[in-house]
Amino acid sequence: MGFLNKKIISWDSPTFGLDLSDLSVKVVQIENDGNRKKLASFGSAPITIGSIADGEIIKKENVVLAIQKAIKSALPKKISTSRVVCSLPETKSFLRIINIPEMKEEEVGEAVKWEMEANIPLPLDQVYYDWQILPKGLARESGKMNVLVVAVSQKTVNQFVDVLESAGLEPISLEIESIAQARSLMPEKENNHTTVIIDLGDRRTSFLFLTGNFPCFTSSIPLSAQSMTDAISKALNLPFEQAEKIKFQYGIGSPTKRDPVFLAVEPILENFVSQIKQSIDFYLDGLRYSPSIDFVVMCGGGARTKGIMPYLSRKINKEIFLGNPWINFNQKDKIPIIKRDDSVQYSTAIGLALREI
């Protein structure tokens, strides 16, 4: 599912994935090495604070420079193409499963249009949208079919296309972050499990619920890894940069000793726990796509914060796994060139890079 899919002559032409968030650019190119997928290039660059705010591009020139810097810094090989698959921000996206009467595929588009007009917060002529019919086994009622629908405001899409083209790139496809993450973190083999992916980023946290490999529901909250750093900074009266170093060294601190670092971040963590539980309850009791949650997977830069996964796991009474973006790579005895703890930050970029492969 992509909002911009250009018809091209050869699908063998290389592409690369570009994850564009509020604070950073990450790029990944993947090659086929015989019967095995291989990471060829990866790189990243920070974006000047304030250049992108909540998914809206404010200072285009800063974003263009960051994209070019990330591409130029890519290792061990250079990015070999200008053809890019880019992420779209979750906060500007709408993803839902709609339930409609069974009908011929050529009739679904009109039904989706009516459902979209009733369920999205923007007029239909102000969004780009896409849809996909889901397997019959996911339908909750006989005589009904489930359709996965995604919509993004035209303003957001046009901004992203403009900044990519200004950076000298050819956008082949645009895809919301959650779908790209599902592609990199979920096994290709079909399953009947329900999984929650928690993406703890620098500016926000997103929740993605999947039944099997199919995204069903997404939501975002403003709590983030930076929220914890801000709390440490205020509680200990330290500059942000020093508070970030303390968080990197001590993580969330010690819940048992209740040291100053933990006391500083505890309100953030408790709020985070409350938001996770509310999202799960809404999915299970409100949407009722699944009877239970089988797995919880965590990704994003904040997932590396020491102690956060065990703490959250105890609080929500479910085991939390660190996302593995290499799950669909046949690595055998080869070690990925990105360290495991670092690679979880590249989950979205890897998923984007895998799209055309």
Image: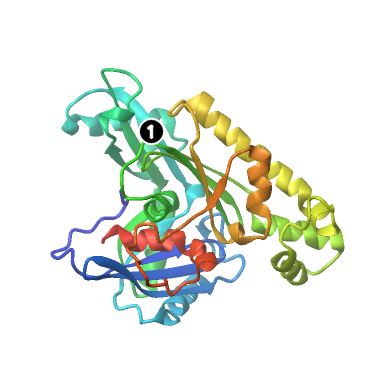
- Residue 223 in sight here: no
Please give the count of numbered marks on the rendered protein. Answer: 1
Please report the residue visible at 51 percent of the width from the left and 63 percent of the height from the top.
345
- The residue nearer to you, when weighing 79 against 304, is 304
The image shows residue 131, relative to residue 18, as above or below, that is above
Residue 147 rendering spot, x and y as whole percentages: 31, 33
Quarter where residue 251 is shown: bottom right
Residue 203 rendering spot, x and y as whole percentages: 61, 56
Please report the residue visible at 61 percent of the width from the left and 40 percent of the height from the top.
276
**In the displayed structure image, the side of residue 212 where residue 277 appears, left or right:** right
Residue that extends furthest to the left in the rendered view of this protein? 9
- Three-letter amino acid code at the position of disc 1: Ile
The image shows residue 262, relative to residue 103, as above or below, that is below
Q: Which residue is mark 1?
A: 97
The image shows residue 345, relative to residue 124, as above or below, that is below
Q: Secondary structure at mark 1?
A: strand
Please report the residue visible at 28 percent of the width from the left and 39 percent of the height from the top.
132
Quarter where residue 144 is shown: top left
- Residue 13 in sight here: yes
- Density class for disc 1 (Cα within 10 Å; few <14, some 14-19, many ≥20) is many
